[in-house]
Amino acid sequence: MPELPEVETVKRAIAPMTIDKRITNVFVGSKGLRWPFPRSLESALNGKRCGAPTRRGKYILIPVSKKQVLLIHLGMSGSIRIYPNRPNLKKHDHFALGFEGDDWLVLCDPRRFGFVDLFCESEIESHWLLKNLGPEPLSEDFTVDYLVAQTAGKTCAIKTFLLDQTKVAGIGNIYAAEALFMAGISPRRQAKTIKRARAERLVTAIQSILRKAIDAGGTSLRNHMQPGGEIGYFVQSLQIYGRSGEHCVKCGSIIKEMKQTGRTTFHCSLCQR
Ligand SMILES: [Zn+2]
């Protein structure tokens, strides 16, 4: 599932095709995604000029004609491909935009858990998907004080806390595991026991891991992006995620795997307390 760095990479990759560019073609699949596409999406977008895309949590937001915002979420399995001319759409391509100059953005989503919405720019703060999102982890709002205050009294596991998009936006299973490993904190530790010293380590770890992944995404865009290649998916050096049975890079003991609220968690029981 794409997390903050992958979505940030997509946002950066599509910026050159959307900024001050007019939409010349719209394809809206008949099936809908997680929810049906907004009514009249095609006519609402066609011919409109777009602006610079932004990202909030795992959502991509593209300004359309200065009055509206196109929201794209990649869900579990969604990916965006870009093409320098009109592509042949495939079975799982459910939404596509052609821009002047014939650049194309195609949303492919085999499991159809993603979604697309179009709403008034004035509703951006109150939109139901955006209004309850917690702070951006790379913003100045995400501080040690914030983390200490938000975890106080919470009996859930710290990993579950990090996945809660209302507490901090954009972190998913991979980066939660990596950040907790880097900070030396057990994913099972109760959130309320995260006091200042651990909170400092965790904020530092989250920010450094996300920054590193965003840099890796940027590198992948410069080096590997082929027309029609999926963007936002890049090989990166994960230290704990997906490595059960392997040796911990810090202490050499065997990395373990467990389930936490239905999600697989990887941890080193020696290094993470
Ligand atoms: Zn270890």
Image: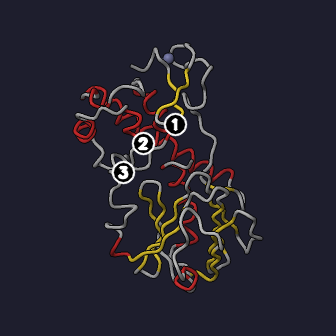
Kindly identify the amino acid type of the residue bearing the numbered disc 3: Glu
Q: Earlier in the sequence, mark 1 or mark 2?
A: 2
Q: Which residue is mark 1?
A: 263
Asked if 12 appears above or below 160 in the picture, the reply is: below
Q: Which residue is mark 3?
A: 136
The residue sitting at 41% across, 24% down in the picture is 186
Residue 41: x, y in percent? 54, 79
Secondary element under disc 3, as helix, strand or loop, is: loop
Residue 14: x, y in percent? 57, 65
Q: Which mark is residue 187?
A: none
CB under 8 Å between callouts 3 and 2? Answer: no
Kindly identify the amino acid type of the residue bearing the numbered disc 2: Leu
The residue sitting at 77% across, 70% down in the picture is 88
Residue 118: x, y in percent? 47, 74
Front-most of 152 and 211? 152
Front-most of 233 and 167? 167
Residue 162: which quarter of the image?
top left
Asked if 9 appears above or below 243 in the picture, the reply is: below
Residue 257: x, y in percent? 55, 25
Q: Which mark is residue 163?
A: 2
Mark 2 is surrounded, within 10 Å at the Cα level, by few (under 14), some (14 to 19) or many (20 or more) other residues, namely some
Number of residue marks: 3
Q: Is residue 263 left or right of residue 31?
A: left
Q: Is residue 45 left or right of residue 166?
A: right
Front-most of 235 and 269? 269
CB under 8 Å between callouts 1 and 2? Answer: yes
CB under 8 Å between callouts 1 and 3? Answer: no
Q: CA distance from mark 1 to mark 2?
A: 10 Å
Q: Earlier in the sequence, mark 3 or mark 2?
A: 3
